[in-house]
Amino acid sequence: MEPTKIVLIVAGGRGERMQSDIPKQFIEVAGKPILMHTIEAFIRYDSGLPIFVVLPADQIKFWENLCSKYSFKFPHHLVVGGETRFHSVKNGLAAVSDFLATFYHDKSENEKYSVLIAVHDGVRPMVSEATIRRCFDEAEKFGTAIPSLDLIDSLRSIHTKHSQSLDRKAYKLVQTPQVFNFNILQKAYEQQFSPLFTDDASVVESIGLNVHLTEGNRENIKLTTAFDLELASFLLAKRENTVY
């Protein structure tokens, strides 16, 4: 039986590093807000995916107005975020659990089926369809799958009085979507918040599970600077020419 696939997009940025008056996920690039491009990346992969978007409470009305302004009609569920990314994902998981309850009437029935959930950054609009597919396919096999890349630049560690070269082959750059069996991720998020949690993989690892690495795509950067916007403008304009 094919697993149920769900997407949870976390978009809680404020735009300080962009020096923007509006949150970075709402900045217009290639004709529409970044968050819309991000949602459409998953629609390209599977137009029937249930998509949950987590936003700060004070941004939801603004987003709804943008959807009206840009005639953005792709269906998605809105979830109110929390104090940190950890709490926002936790709120999103609760919303997904309620959604699943409409299909599975009790927890024991839910556990009979494979449910995969992809957690993705709202400001990574350039994730490729191939990356999304790999993450879902390999999470189905291993229970977890996160996209990663080899480092290209040299790497150094900084000490008080000197720096030291590191073996870049021993490190990976990590991206999203990070895909997990839903029960695994839900269990991981039952624990208390820790500042050591930098992504969903670190939350899952903290309960003693290993995380499977798969290949990401180089252009799947997290948009955080003005230069990132310039790069995204070029790449997204090319993607928008693709009919789907």
Image (cartoon, rainbow, N blue to C red):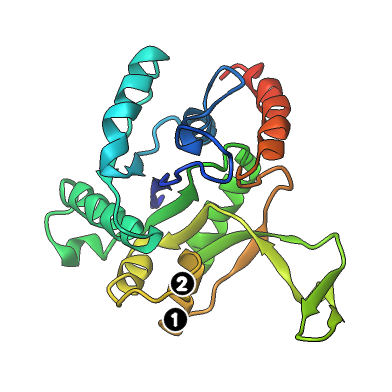
Crowdedness near tag 1: few (<14), some (14–19) or many (≥20) residues, C-alpha within 10 Å: some
Q: Which image quarter: residue 184?
A: bottom left
Q: Residue at x 63, y 66 (%)?
A: 213
Q: In this orientation, does residue 227 appear?
A: yes
Q: Which image quarter: residue 146?
A: bottom right
Q: Residue at x 35, y 61 (%)?
A: 182
Where is mark 1, residue-wise?
A: 206
Extreme-front residue of the structure: 161
Q: Label 2 sits on what residue type?
A: Phe
Q: Residue at x 44, y 30 (%)?
A: 47
Q: Residue at x 71, y 67 (%)?
A: 172
Q: Which SS class for mark 1?
A: loop
Contact between labelled residues 1 and 2, with CB atoms less than 8 Å apart = yes
CA gap, disc 2 and disc 1: 9 Å
Judge whether 20 appears above or below 177 on screen. above
Residue 224 position in % (x across, y down)? 60, 45
Crowdedness near tag 2: few (<14), some (14–19) or many (≥20) residues, C-alpha within 10 Å: some
Residue 112 position in % (x across, y down)? 27, 64
For the residue pair 100 and 233, the one nearer the viewer reads as 233
Residue 237 position in % (x across, y down)? 67, 21
Where is mark 2, residue-wise?
A: 197
For the residue pair 29 and 244, the one nearer the viewer reads as 29
For the residue pair 193 and 72, the one nearer the viewer reads as 193
